[in-house]
């Protein structure tokens, strides 16, 4: 049976929320708790910057400098030793820039990248189409979010690796 890995990127391969938090807090250190609330609630990042009176482009620059891979997820991926396709709900532009910013932190090679323009997780038909169009029969879906990254399909085994933040 031909198997592959479908991996979410933001929150799974990289700890995007921590990077956003650090970026905002560098520019607005007195609002740490408020910033966490907005990030965890998945508020629009540009709107968060606007509400805090920050230059969004500077926030993005800092965010990318703080992006780091989640080594526990990298170990799972390396242990499976299968082809890897990134599947994300983010825009293709953001996704590719974020992948580029961390490519030196690991030696993984992604066979293909699907973004929000291609479809949305966890839509079962979309995920099954990705598996079949890449000529595989089965996938391990690795994600961090039980809602966005859990695919109900006989073609998929879900591996959830949530991020836990402590205050």
Image: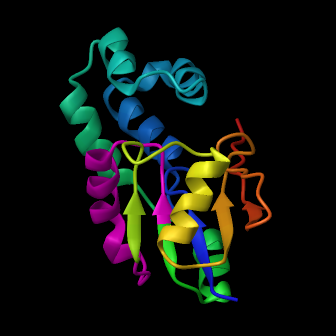
Q: Position of residue 133 (x, y in %)?
A: 48, 69
Asked whether residue 135 is drawn in magenta, I would say no
Residue 127 sits above or below residue 90 on the image: below
Residue at point 56% right, 51% down?
126
For residue 22, side relative to residue 60 (left or right)? right
Residue 53 sits above or below residue 147 on the image: above
Q: Nearer the viewer, residue 39 or 120?
A: 120
The boundaries of the magenta stretch are: 86-110
Residue 125 sits above or below residue 133 on the image: above
Question: Is residue 44 at least partly visible in the picture?
Answer: yes
Q: Position of residue 106 (x, y in %)?
A: 43, 79
Q: Position of residue 46 (x, y in %)?
A: 32, 22
Q: Nearer the viewer, residue 30 or 122?
A: 122
Residue 108 sits above or below residue 162 on the image: below
Q: Position of residue 12 (x, y in %)?
A: 58, 57
Image quadrant occupied by the N terminus? bottom right
Image quadrant occupied by the C terminus? top right
Residue at point 76% right, 57% down?
153
């Amino acid at each position: 049976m031909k198997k592959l890995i479908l991996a979410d990127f933001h929150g799974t391969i990289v700890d995007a929320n921590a990077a956003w938090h650090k970026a905002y807090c560098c520019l607005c250190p007195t609002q740490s708790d408020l910033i966490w609330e907005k990030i965890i609630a998945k508020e629009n990042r540009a709107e968060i910057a606007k509400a805090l009176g920050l230059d969004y482009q500077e926030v993005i620059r800092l965010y990318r400098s703080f992006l780091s891979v989640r080594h526990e997820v990298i170990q799972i991926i390396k242990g499976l030793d299968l082809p890897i396709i990134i599947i994300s709900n983010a825009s293709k532009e953001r996704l590719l820039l974020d992948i580029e910013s961390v490519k030196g932190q690991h030696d993984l090679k992604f066979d293909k990248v699907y973004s929000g323009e291609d479809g949305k997780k966890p839509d079962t038909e979309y995920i099954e189409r990705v598996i079949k169009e890449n000529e595989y029969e089965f996938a391990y879906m690795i994600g961090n979010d039980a809602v966005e990254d859990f695919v109900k399909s006989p073609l998929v085994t879900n591996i959830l690796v949530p991020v836990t933040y402590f205050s």
